[in-house]
Image (cartoon, coloured by chain):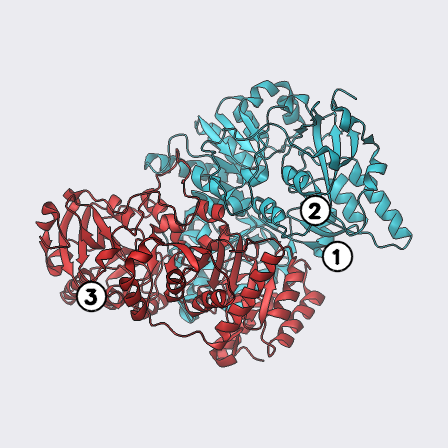
Chain colours: A cyan, B red
Amino acid sequence: MTSRITCPTLAARVTDAEQAATHIRPGMTVGMSGFTGAGYPKQVPQALATQIAAAHERGERFGIRMLTGASTAPELDGVLARTGGIDFRLPYQSDPELRERINRGEIDYMDIHLGHVAQFARSGFFGPIDVALIEVAAIRPDGALVPSTSVGNNATWLELADTVILEVNADQPAGLEGMHDIASCPAPPHRPPIPLTTPGQRIGEPYLRVDPSKVVAVVETHGPDRLTPFAAPDDASRRIAGHLVEFFRHEVARGRLPANLLPLQSGVGNIANAVLEGLREGGFEQLTAYTEVIQDAMLGMIRDGLITTASATALSLSPAGVADFVARIDHYRQRIVLRPQEISNHAELIRRLGCLALNGMVEADIYGNVNSTHVAGTRIINGIGGSGDFARNSFIACFMTPSTAKGGAVSTIVPMVSHVDHTEHDVSVVVTEQGLADLRGLSPRQRAHAIIKHCAHPDFRPQLQDYVDRAYLHSRGLHTPHLLPEALSWHQRFLDTGSMRV
Amino acid sequence: MTSRITCPTLAARVTDAEQAATHIRPGMTVGMSGFTGAGYPKQVPQALATQIAAAHERGERFGIRMLTGASTAPELDGVLARTGGIDFRLPYQSDPELRERINRGEIDYMDIHLGHVAQFARSGFFGPIDVALIEVAAIRPDGALVPSTSVGNNATWLELADTVILEVNADQPAGLEGMHDIASCPAPPHRPPIPLTTPGQRIGEPYLRVDPSKVVAVVETHGPDRLTPFAAPDDASRRIAGHLVEFFRHEVARGRLPANLLPLQSGVGNIANAVLEGLREGGFEQLTAYTEVIQDAMLGMIRDGLITTASATALSLSPAGVADFVARIDHYRQRIVLRPQEISNHAELIRRLGCLALNGMVEADIYGNVNSTHVAGTRIINGIGGSGDFARNSFIACFMTPSTAKGGAVSTIVPMVSHVDHTEHDVSVVVTEQGLADLRGLSPRQRAHAIIKHCAHPDFRPQLQDYVDRAYLHSRGLHTPHLLPEALSWHQRFLDTGSMRV
């Protein structure tokens, strides 16, 4: 037994990664930990990749079906994708190796709302879960598991899997203990209300539970999460944040939002960080967050008391953020709750709390449909993640992007998005560095006017207005006027010439 | 006072429709009752239309902003659209006159999830509500209102409006009293869980409340709702129903659904009726419904005890259905609960109950995106209604349509839908008379295979497969392969030639 493994039964299962990986066999479905590069298993996937590569060298077929919380890291998605060992993957990824193989058509990838995975898995929609492979921070004397830096779907994988492999990572902060709140949801019928009414409320217990008889291997590991460097917000992000902050001020002044807003859901990335910095500079305080991921900017606002409580399912910090997190972990443990993604992204709770959903996007069209996932309709970038969970059931759904990409060659405001992840019915606000279009209460024609005027880059405004004008002349129906042969031509022009400009 | 108006204060406000209509003035926003042709005001809108027409003849501008529960009837949407008196309309309509003007670009129409309207109105997103015009079945001595055959957003309009006009329709069954359950939801923050855990549970009171000082007119009316003739299911509908019943049997056998299924949400129309008849013939019993609208087939199953309880926000019956409803109203009052659409379509409740969402559609594409609203991307038919409320948060979201339309000239399975109302992330099952594609757990490529094989009409299968095959050869990304210049060409061919056939 070590200081991290104080359960005699499970201490007796300690083995090495190579031995542990042998429990994963061809054709199996494996539920793994990991969410936004946090809390993923660090060693067994690499050992598994070696075994898969060896099998392939012997001419044997070896592929698995792989389910996680969300994105992981090169030591998991990367190595396994590179071996050709992933047949099927859900619900989210952001790994360059894996993405490339998905877009080559070599791996079947299901891009699904993060908040739906546990319910569908529990109800058998993805078939049996053979193995759970979960990183934890410690194992207590009674076998209870101290979760790691993400919770994700871990409780579900531990519950459903026939066989469990645990990685105990001694480099994860011991002070994580007590920060988690593990509650589960039964399958229907007979589901009681989830009793959570404020972001910081605890409704479960701080530990994951597992039937010890299912645990076939415990592997002691070391090593950091995939830490994301924190980039200072660029000018476009700061301007996007400025428009949003002005919008929120206006809503508060009109009595449509409380002075401390509503629980914030903040997507991952630099724009999200910039928006939080903007709220700080704008003098907002007593804020709360009900979100998926805590990044550096949010951590800083929790540190400084501007965000009083934050609920999430994972941390996604820079090296400096981790250092601060560890240094003040007792402070953060009073203010941060890490939950299963089924709870962090649950429709019932997002709707009840009235979250303000702030998510990035690839592009929006003039009618307010949003593409979050695909370049030119066919190449997936990452996935929808939790943006649909939050946008669909939020109080106000905001989507943000700079108005151009590829050095100005691409307009992120287009006549028709090449893939729809959020429909016109679910998008309240579109923001670019140019401005903000408040789409609430507007018809499609009114939305087109607002989006072109406020969000499109001036270089593309005439081209967009020309499309709209001609669509009004020639479209069969004038509720949502379109010229079908031209609607996706901007994307095709980009594919052909590298630019959407005429 | 009459037998229907037993409150002295409100009886003193009785006047005629012409006088009542004068309270609605140009530029006002009016919240009206009415959901699927049930419970809409019968006389004041016609008087208003006359006054609008007279104003227009005098050269005066007279348009209003009109918010309802959902669709109404010719005596409301029809007459007001014909006068040119509607500037803006939400959240749903199905009137031929109104639809035509929307598609001519004369009326701004916002097509919005029915379950979101009350929250957004209460929070001021649609501006102030000047007048509420609400049909009720009776007024009690204490001023409490007995709701009519639909509840819709009536509680919200009564709460928010500065001025209230009531129509008391003596032809609505007196026995409706006690059938409703009026509960409201506060604005965030500080919202408790909605305590409903079974479809038949009552969590409010059976009456609508209004501040009597706001009531400026009470009009006594007579007349039936817009009653929908019940068409016996045609062959295609019966085959669609057969595939769904087989699917449900299979899910029960696999232990993924209880023997009495989960609460059914059944869209409006003949396919929905056919599915319910199919469940009856399939021997299902002890069913429940948590839905928007109760149609004849559901009423019959409640009568015969196959559906034990049904929750909805409106009745949409045939003349024979109404006769049966009135004859057995004491029986039905024990088994039917009519609720505000905010509750009937609430994300929290749909998710908790695990509804099986069964909705019609215009078309689906090979990747499982669904168009519920637009012909060829530009002409709106009705609107998204509650299909998004239910599909997005349901346990299994099924979309149904015959595989062809326009006498076989149009395939309802297309390479890319011309408008997206339900994204690939939200669609579990696609059904046509050809068969059923179970999309759960499938990647886009697997979905395309299943949908073409099981759902497309044989006449269009080769054309679809040819598209897919060529997309795999030429698409930039192979996660969701497409040929952008061709993706919407089927719709353009239909516009040009009246057919999608090559």
Residue A34, image quadrant: top right
Mark 3: few, some, or many residues within 10 Å (few <14, many ≥20)? few
Instruction: Indicate the quadrant containing the C terminus of chain A: top left, top right, bottom left or bottom right.
Output: bottom right
| Residue pointed to by mark 1 | A106
In this rendering, the answer to whether B168 lies above or below B270 is above
In this rendering, the answer to whether A32 lies above or below A136 is below
Dots 3 and 1 on the same chain: no
Q: Is residue B461 left or right of residue B147?
A: right
Q: CA distance from mark 2 to mark 3?
A: 59 Å
Q: Chain of mark 1?
A: A
- The front one of B113 and A444 is B113
> What amino acid is at disc 2?
Ile
- The front one of B279 and B484 is B279
The answer to whether mark 1 and mark 2 are in CB contact below 8 A is: no
The answer to whether mark 2 and mark 3 are in CB contact below 8 A is: no
| Residue pointed to by mark 2 | A129
Q: CA distance from mark 1 to mark 2?
A: 22 Å
Mark 2: few, some, or many residues within 10 Å (few <14, many ≥20)? many
Residue A112 x/y as whole percent:
60, 50
Residue B18 x/y as whole percent:
12, 60
Q: Chain of mark 3?
A: B
- The front one of A264 and A406 is A264
| Residue pointed to by mark 3 | B223
Dots 2 and 3 on the same chain: no
Q: Secondary structure at mark 3?
A: loop
